[in-house]
Amino acid sequence: MMKDRICEELSAIETSENLKTLLAVESGSRAWGFASPDSDYDVRFFYIRPQEYYLRLEKRRDVCEWMLDEILDINGWDFDKTLRLLRASNPTLFEWINSPIIYKKHPAFDSIMANVNDFFLSKPGLHHYLSMAEGNYREFLKSDMVKTKKYFYVLRPILACRHVLHNGTPPPMLFKELVEAQLDSSLVEEVVELLELKKTSSEMGEAPRRNRINAYIEESLAYLDSEVRKQPAGSPKQPWERLNGIFMQALKLTE
């Protein structure tokens, strides 16, 4: 099983890099719930090293890249980098934390990262998802024949934006949940049909452009762009002292 291989690779990383995995998850289409039969595995993880590693004066890397082949890609962030990004409300970080597919989790992770949503800011999330939707729509969905998977790389961030606007919290990872809560009901049947096509087609599979969905996308992008412009800039809500405390707690609990 692929999960067994992934766990073996994570153990190999821990040994060779002298680190401990805090959380390892699937990101991308598999975690979003619309993987194709030939989708690759995008494993992302947070890790922490022994305390003395953080006391060195020389510059050090705070990422771990373990790209294996076209099927399996493993990348991680050091926990100090993670906390700096958390303070800035990095949307990708919340995606990883909320992934429904977990490969490995340290017993202390939940207590270390309790109340993580306190750090979420709407503005960075809205910008992230809107930019993703606009870029993919502009580049991939205006031809007569389009890659089916690209619809979901536009629709999911649009629905994620709507969730953030309505709730002010990180959006759920599963596309199905976003469809149920945020998609115009008149489009649900067609989008579900398209989703089934995507799940049974190659990653490179193409199909005729869906004009009704394209019209919804264009209308949504215009609406969201207007709404995002109205949002206050926002700034980190949490003091560095709290993040320093989380980091020290993590070092103690993972000794």
Image: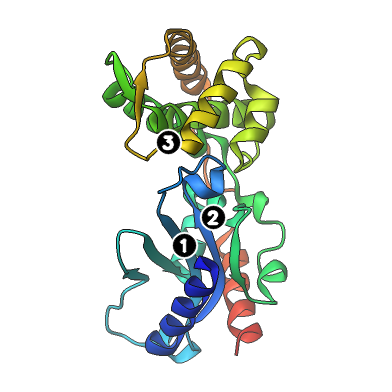
* Residue under pointer 1: 44
Q: Quadrant of residue 62?
A: bottom left
Label 1: how many Cα within 10 Å (few below 14, some 14–19, many 20+): many
Residue 207 or 13: which is nearer the viewer? 207
Q: CA distance from mark 3 to mark 2?
A: 26 Å
Q: Residue 221's spot in the image, x, y percent?
A: 44, 17
* Residue under pointer 2: 96
* Residue under pointer 3: 201
Direction from residue 243 to residue 78 in the image, left or right? left
Q: Quadrant of residue 204?
A: top left
Residue 89, can we see it? no
Quadrant the C terminus occupies: bottom right
Q: Residue at x 62, y 52 (%)?
A: 98
Q: Residue 176's spot in the image, x, y percent?
A: 64, 34
**Contact? badges 2 and 1 (CB < 8 Å):** yes
| In the rendered image, the vertical position of residue 61 relative to residue 98, given as above or below | below
Q: Element at badge 2?
A: helix
Residue 85, can we see it? yes
Q: Element at badge 1?
A: strand
Which mark sits nearer the N-terminus, 2 or 1? 1
Q: CA distance from mark 3 to mark 1?
A: 25 Å
| In the rendered image, the vertical position of residue 163 relative to residue 88, given as above or below | above
Q: Element at badge 3?
A: loop
The residue under label 1 is which amino acid type? Arg
Label 2: how many Cα within 10 Å (few below 14, some 14–19, many 20+): many
Residue 42 or 55: which is nearer the viewer? 42
| In the rendered image, the vertical position of residue 11 relative to residue 62, given as above or below | below
The residue at the far front in this view is 200
Q: Residue at x 48, y 44 (%)?
A: 29
